[in-house]
Amino acid sequence: MTKARIFGSQDVLAGLMFILIGAAALALSSAYPHGTSTRMGPGYFPTLLGWLLTGLGALIAARGVLSPGASVPGGSPRCALVLAAVVAFGLLLKPAGLAIATAVLVGLGAVANRDFRAIEIVLIYLVLIAIAIVVFVYGVGVQLSIGPA
Amino acid sequence: MDLFSALSLGFGAALQPVSLLYCFIGVLCGTLVGVLPGIGPMATIAMLLPVTFGLDATSALIMLAGIYYGAQYGGSTSAVLVNLPGETSSVVTCLDGYKMARQGRAGAALGIAAIGSFAAGCFGTALIALFAPPLAQLAIQFGPAEYCALMVLGLIAAVVMAQGSLLKAIAMIVLGLLFGTAGTDVNSGYQRFTFGLPELAEGVDFVVLAIGLFGLAEIMVNVESKEKRTVLVNPVKSVLPTRADLRQSAMPILRGTMLGSVLGVLPGGGALLSSFASYTLEKNLARDPSRFGNGAIEGVAGPEAANNAGAQTSFIPMLTLGLPSNGVMALMIGAMIMQGIVPGPQVVSDQPRLFWGMIASMWVGNLMLVVLNLPLIGLWVKMLSLPYRMLSPAILLFSCIGVYTLSSQPFDLILTALFGFVGYVFIKLGCEAAPLLLGFVLGPMIEENLRRAMLMSRGDPIIFLERPISLGLLLLAVALLVAVLLPSVRKTREEAFQE
């Protein structure tokens, strides 16, 4: 059992994640009035959950150290483009309008795929923007400007 | 209200042109996402939730329900034709369905899948109509302590029955409960976990969480993996099974329906477990088990009937107790809350039109699905040749517009991206996200009932053990946990999911 296997183990890392979140929850909710068990304050339930989560995280991590099990599969930086597409769309939608925001979203979202073709992206964009305008702007009546504000 | 007048009220609501339209849209979307691998009913329902704001509650829920059971039909199409399960519940259908297609019997496989699904869907719906009202009657007498115990049991049962690591699933539930506490506390007006952001004052929006964890995270994992699809070139001729096929399938369909109906009611059961169990049952009952895996029609008929029956009866705990038994039901509860309906046993008596309308619409929807699936099979096959790289921008765009319509704030989209990242990390760490959603939905209800129960008992937790119903429910939860931790049971559980 090597160190690398322990540090790459799904269980160890997941356990650490739960411990971290649980500890953060405990730290944050210590600032809220705790109350008594009869009259529970806003801090009571989150504190309870924080302890539970930390404990469960410790159990999971401990199990992972004893038998590492499956390791975390590798990722690809490509998937960050998907998130970038969503954030860009959110930031652009109001100032630049639906047409431009969608172009950026479709562009980034399509490039995130392993194999993409420029001509296809243009076609997908045209189809999608047409659907978006017909269904959402005219159909559902979402308040959106199509061009730049 | 007797069953007859209740059903006529339901059909009155479900046969309205508007209801028919939304039912149709629902089952159409469901079939489509069921056929397409890479997008499931979870992501689709999350994506369409914002659109349902403008609808009345009955239409909204009819449509969302249609997506779920429609996806069970669609999933079998891609399983048979491409050997790719469009939905996880049709994994088993691949085994014999695809073999049948290779032998030139794709039509018979698809036909029997549709017939089995229809029979099971109708039966499952009838069970909801028969058993939901008395169950709700019983649950309506529950006090806060009983309710708390019931929700704990529901959550525990949901993870025990589900796949994967038990400890991680429980941790995910607790994490979901924690996420559910974010925002303004209803009792004290105190802001919790808002980090001073006014956008978080009302807590994390359900749609934002669901689209991030399921929609975005799914896309992120999909763009990483290599696409492999081999569309069957043989055109599908007749979808009508022969007389011999029907005779061979009748009993498996019947058994699958029974099995699926029972397993569907259990939390965490639903469609997936039902189809696995039915396949195992048919294989064990067969005179010649070696035929299974080589194109046995019983291996398609049984599981397909079971997954549809299970999908249908998994509505029972959701409608009668307000208890979600799987991720999709958690989304349905979220949709109800957004419509201003408090989920719980009172829905049956307070919202008869909604409740019976939904049930009646399931019959209508199942009928629509047979019509959609059999003659239009060619169209669905064509959809299958659409590569994922053309699909993902569409899913992204509709998800983003959906999130934006919530409050027209860029903040919501940034939060969605954040949850997308979180969901991606969960997948990489082998943590299933559905239990988190169950916890998130039930969190506020558990906290409120816990608070009330403790107030009643003056802070003594013994109240949960003094009341017979609450004690029974909690003992059942403990028994479930202990049972799963026993080595022998654990081994069979792992084997059952491995098959």
Image (cartoon, rainbow, N blue to C red):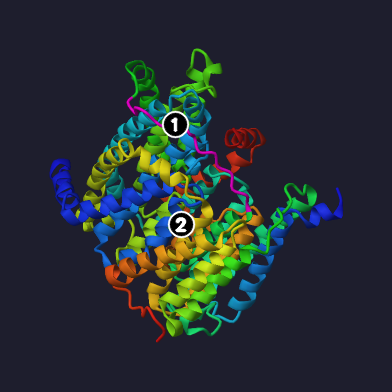
Please state, as top left, top right, bottom left or bottom right, where the C terminus of chain B lies in the image. top right
Residue B233 colored magenta?
A: yes
Q: Is residue B183 above or below residue B323?
A: below
Residue B494 visible within the image? yes
Give the number of callouts: 2
Q: Is residue B224 left or right of residue B200?
A: right
Q: Is residue A87 left or right of residue B401?
A: right
Task: Read off the magenta span.
Answer: B225-240
Image mark 2: chain: B
Q: Where residue A147 appears, x then y in whole percent?
A: 39, 81
Going from N to C along the chain, the mark reached first, 2 or 1, is 2
Residue that numbered label 1 is attached to: B303
Residue B415 visible within the image? no
Instruction: Please tell me which residue lies in front, B346 or B8.
Output: B8
Q: Where residue B435 appears, x then y in whole percent?
A: 52, 55
Q: Based on the displayed image, in which of its 4 quarters is residue B186 positioned?
A: bottom left
For the residues labelled 2 and 1, the Cα–Cα distance comes to 24 Å
Let me know if marks 2 and 1 both belong to one chain.
yes
Q: Which mark is residue B43?
A: 2
Q: Residue furthest right?
A: A2
Image mark 1: chain: B
Instruction: Please tell me which residue lies in front, B332 or B218.
Output: B218
| Mark 1 Cα-neighbour bin, 10 Å: few <14, some 14–19, many ≥20 | many
Q: Is residue B245 above or below residue B408?
A: above
- Residue drawn at (29%, 49%), measured in percent from left and top? B136
- Residue drawn at (80%, 54%), measured in percent from left and top? A6
Q: Is residue B95 above or below residue B136?
A: above
